Image (spheres, grey):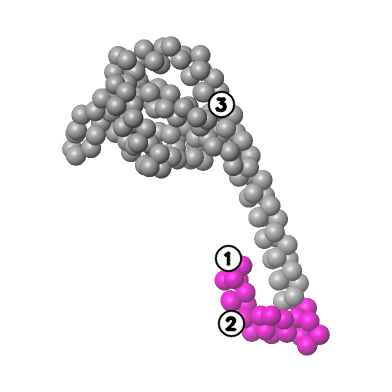
Amino acid sequence: MPPVFAHGRLRLYLLKLLDEAPRHGYEVIRLLEERFQGLYAPSAGTVYPRLAKLEAEGLVTHTTEGGRKVYAITDAGRAELADRSGELADLELEIRESVAELAAEIRADVRGAAGDLRREVRAAASEARHGGATGTGEYGDPGDKESWRAAKEEMR
């Protein structure tokens, strides 16, 4: 799967999120996960170093509330957002498209897995009904309740 954010784009999006309201790092991670409808959530190892870099560049600042750093955008950060507003609009579109692509990939994976499971269930059911030449299959005699329980549990 290709990266969700191209080089420098997460940085820009972090500024956008902080322009909406001051936030702590975990909240930023949660918001990104929401914007991607649960299909992507950056790790703390991705978000916190970028927030620290933005702070070192003077684009954000932080205060400490309840033991957590709460980041807020600075005037310099707002100026960068304004300068890159066209790029930000493109990024918003890319995010929507990325979510649609990720969802399509997941749907295809689930469809394939469901098809595989249906084939396996049919084969197991057929084997259980016919039980081979001896009248018993992998799960034993079809009249054996314990064997059927084991087969159902395996299907789950």
- For residue 54, which quarter of the picture? top left
Q: Residue 106 carries which label?
A: none
Residue 71 appearing in the image: yes
Residue 95, given in percent of the width and then of the height, sits at 53, 28
> Amino acid under label 1?
Arg
The residue located at (67%, 60%) in the rendering is 117
The answer for how far apart the CA atoms under marks 1 and 3 are is 38 Å
- Part of the protein shown in magenta: 129-156
Which dot, 2 or 1, sits closer to the camera? Answer: 1
Residue 109 in percent (x, y) is at 64, 49
In the picture provided, is 105 more to the left or to the right than 91? right
Residue 154 lies within the magenta run: yes
Q: Is mark 1 on a helix, strand or loop?
A: loop
Q: Residue 156 carries which label?
A: 1
- Residue 62 to residue 140: above or below: above
- Residue that badge 2 annotates: 146
